[in-house]
């Protein structure tokens, strides 16, 4: 996608939602970290149903260790992979106590050293909890970046690096949330809602022009089919 189109793309998303926020409910960096770990292969809605009771019992690393793996598991049974998640949350809480004084670290390398925390999860915590301009590429963002021609790539890491190269600095802090919301609510996997209220960024989108047989070229290359 050409630089002018990238600028338009994010300007329009910014106008629609100037100050986006995470859909996960949390009050501290530790609660956010736990919620992000719980969100793997689970919806944010499902996580938000499980965490109030969990955080009422344990909203610090020390309290989570004291609650124990079984106690954690009892609060998150409604979520997928709850056994592994309970194990990870208990272990990362212990590691936070042992290595970081109970505080959530503010670097990607330190976050990724915690059980159950990969690059995507670390980027979410850095961005949402600490205001760092990171881009966590999940399935929604991967799809939007490829389908629109914004930042094509074969892997999430490739898309992340491409986005970091092309997104203007003034949009970087919120780019993750804008792309995530666009993918989750508009540019959906099975049936993108291109025609409802028409899409804000359709004039920039390779996929939209392709399905309408409109001559349109983007600098980044071709989009992917709607099943991505």
Image: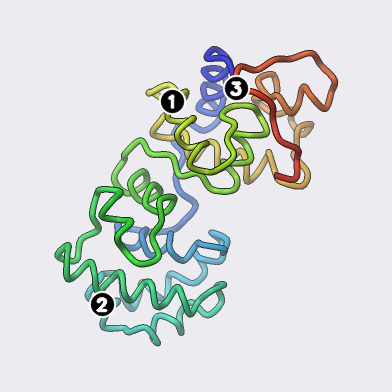
223 lies left or right of 115? right
Give the Cα distance between marks 2 and 1: 41 Å
* In contact (CB < 8 Å): disc 2 and disc 3: no
> Where is residue 108 shown, x and y percent of the image?
30, 48
> Where is residue 4 shown, x and y percent of the image?
55, 12
Of all residues, the one furthest to the right in this rendering is: 213
> Where is residue 37 shown, x and y percent of the image?
43, 63
Of all residues, the one furthest to the front in this rendering is: 154
* In contact (CB < 8 Å): disc 2 and disc 1: no
46 lies left or right of 99? right
Q: Which is closer to the viewer, label 2 or label 1?
A: 1
In the depicted structure, whether residue 66 falls above or below residue 100:
below
Residue annotated with mark 1? 165
Tag 2's secondary structure? helix
In-front residue for pair 30/225:
225
Of all residues, the one furthest to the left in this rendering is: 101
Badge count? 3
Q: Residue 220 carries which label?
A: 3
In the depicted structure, whether residue 146 falls above or below residue 119:
above
- Label 2 vs 3, first from the N-terminus: 2
Quadrant containing the C terminus is top right
In the depicted structure, whether residue 155 falls above or below residue 1:
below
The picture quadrant where one finds residue 99 is bottom left
Give the Cα distance between marks 2 and 3: 48 Å
Give the Cα distance between marks 3 and 1: 12 Å
Residue annotated with mark 2? 63
């Amino acid at each position: 996608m050409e630089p002018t189109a990238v600028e338009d793309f994010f300007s329009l998303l910014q106008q629609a939602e100037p100050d986006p926020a995470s859909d996960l409910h949390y009050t501290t960096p530790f609660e956010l970290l736990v919620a992000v770990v719980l969100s793997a292969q689970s919806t944010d809605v499902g996580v938000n149903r499980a965490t109030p009771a969990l955080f009422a019992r344990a909203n610090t690393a020390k309290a989570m260790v004291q609650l124990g793996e079984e106690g954690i598991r009892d609060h998150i049974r409604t979520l997928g992979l709850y056994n592994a998640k309970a194990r990870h949350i208990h272990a990362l809480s212990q590691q936070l106590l042992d290595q970081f004084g109970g505080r959530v670290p503010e670097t990607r390398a330190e976050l990724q050293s915690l059980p159950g925390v990969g690059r995507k999860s670390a980027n979410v915590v850095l961005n949402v909890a600490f205001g760092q301009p990171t881009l966590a590429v999940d399935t929604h963002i991967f799809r939007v970046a490829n389908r629109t021609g914004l930042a094509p790539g074969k892997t999430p890491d490739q898309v992340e690096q491409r986005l970091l190269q092309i997104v203007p600095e003034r949009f970087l802090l919120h780019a993750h949330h804008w792309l995530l919301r666009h993918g989750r609510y508009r540019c959906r996997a099975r049936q993108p809602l291109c025609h409802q209220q028409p899409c804000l960024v359709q004039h920039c989108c390779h996929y939209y022009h392709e399905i309408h047989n409109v001559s349109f070229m983007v600098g980044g290359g071709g989009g992917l089919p709607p099943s991505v």
